[in-house]
Image (cartoon, helix red, strand yellow):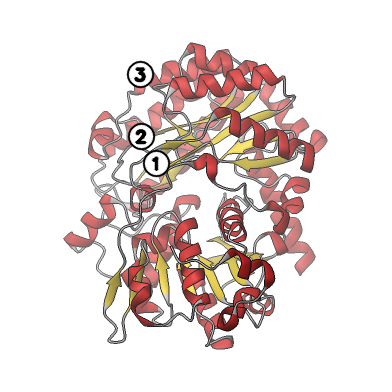
Amino acid sequence: MFSVNSNQLESGDLGENSSILSPITLIRPPIVSSKASFSAPATPPLGLAYLSAALKKENFKVCPIDALGLDIETYQEVDKDDVYLYRGLSIEKIIALIPEDSLMIGISCMFSQEWLFVIELLEGVHLKYPDIPIVVGGEHVSALYEEVLHTCSFIKACAIGEGEETLVDLAFYFLQGGKGSQLSGIAGTASLDSTGSLVLGPKRKRIQDLDEMPLPDWDSMPIEVYLSSGYGHGTNQGRTMPLLGTRGCPYSCTFCSNKQMWTTRYVTRTPSKIVDEMEFYRDKYNVSHFDFYDLTAIVRKEWYVAFAEELIKRGMDISYSLPSGTRSEAIDEEVTALMHKTKCRYLVYAAETGSQRILKLINKKVSLKSLVQSMRSAKKNQMSIRCNLMLGFPDETRLDVMKTVLFQLRLAILGVDDVPLYMFSPYPGSHIFNQLRESGDISELNKEYYEGLICQMDLFKGNRIPTVVSKRELIIWRIVGMTLFYSLSYLFFPKRIIRTYVNIFKVHKTTTVFEQRIVDLLRRRKANQHSQ
């Protein structure tokens, strides 16, 4: 770890390193979606807030730019002939916010469908400030760091994986001049040497103790925009803050890229520390609800029980949701009863498919029977629940597709509130992506490939990889499945019709993601009308 004497930091007497007084600029780009996307959640910049806090802990000055939150109601076409929309500040407006004396500029790219836009942002920033070092990180960068570096050779370094410690080391490196071979010694980085060859630093270990990390730097973010508008990861339950209770996922599903970013090391925070954070946000920001952004929230039953008991002991008048997708093994009758008692309002399961054959092929080690039992228990305890399913895996047959749609309809009759059918996308860093590249089915990472990734949230698009079932047929199955699911849902549970109307038009809160997507669509249309 690079370091500077603490007395020097306090006095500002750093000699040649006086640039410590210069800010480090961190940019969270706008979100990108297709023009016909039915879902593009606007979420608070939790990663940006953690990175900013890590730098401030080391006494660096930080200028964070949340390009989404600073212009959250603006939707713009990337190109008149393109399929993309971006939401947030334009590239010109982002560049205008960068301090000219920045020590370093960090830009994230978490989702691969945003890479084409991020390239334009990177090129624009470099053109304006060619002498300020640019570093990049995020899940896309962690999966394709060599591709990223050769696409934008002016990038000084890629941060691979968990970013806080790597970013701090890079900040100290550039503080001390940013020259010589020390860059190659920074763990968790990739860079190009003077000949254009790839140089990898040592592998960085995951952060061992999450309890020692500083809380996210929300004071430097436009957090009130999200709190007062109802934007977030799941449903709108009022003023909602994001939280992390765990990091990582111990599983290795072949369609998922998280292993490349986080490894399979699953780390939990101490439950009492999480509740401390909840209390702090409740008092400081007047929030009443929390969304857990964990990759896989509940893996160990004893950990969740300890968390729930801590909530009960403190008698906190708050609610929370688990909107990211979790497994069912640890969510039994006892757990769902505790969820109800502690006001867990929304829970998402990640089944992915209704076909046991496909579950085996994608290494999704879950029992559909156990999952259904868990969902039945959750509904018994009056929770709103969702189950994520996908179509379009490379080896998926028509029979597999039918089993998934039939499973979806079975869940409608069971009372599950949301069961969207997403289209599979081969994300960089996943095992399936690597297989498709080796077979030549993904021949090059061009504009066509990146545009194909946005099919996940677009009902009328299929991915651009070879599939047993045709793209057209998959789109039809998807539309039919989702139409039948929500029709059956409201037919078997007619009170939901009144609930949906009241939620959307009266109380301005939502119980399901279906309701939230209707609200988002109405907002988007209103924003488009104002811009015309």
Q: Are marks 2 and 1 in contact (CB under 8 Å)?
A: yes
Which amino acid is tagged 1? Met
Residue under label 3, please give it: 369
Q: Which mark is residue 353?
A: 2
Label 2 and label 1: CA atoms lie apart by: 6 Å
Q: Which mark is residue 518?
A: none
- Name which of mark 3 and mark 2 comes first in the sequence: 2
Residue 284 coordinates in the image, percent (x, y): 78, 42
Judged from the image, the secondary structure of the residue bearing numbered disc 3 is helix
Position of 150 relative to 464 (above/below):
below
> Which quadrant of the rendered structure holds the C terminus?
bottom right
Crowding at dot 3, Cα within 10 Å, few <14 / some 14-19 / many 20+, comes out as: few
Residue 242 coordinates in the image, percent (x, y): 62, 42
Q: Is residue 105 left or right of residue 466?
A: right
Which amino acid is tagged 3? Lys
Q: From this viewpoint, is residue 445 visible? A: no
Judged from the image, the secondary structure of the residue bearing numbered disc 2 is loop
Q: From this viewpoint, is residue 486 visible? A: yes
Residue under label 1, please give it: 390
Which amino acid is tagged 2? Thr
Label 3 and label 2: CA atoms lie apart by: 13 Å
Position of 46 relative to 292 (above/below):
below
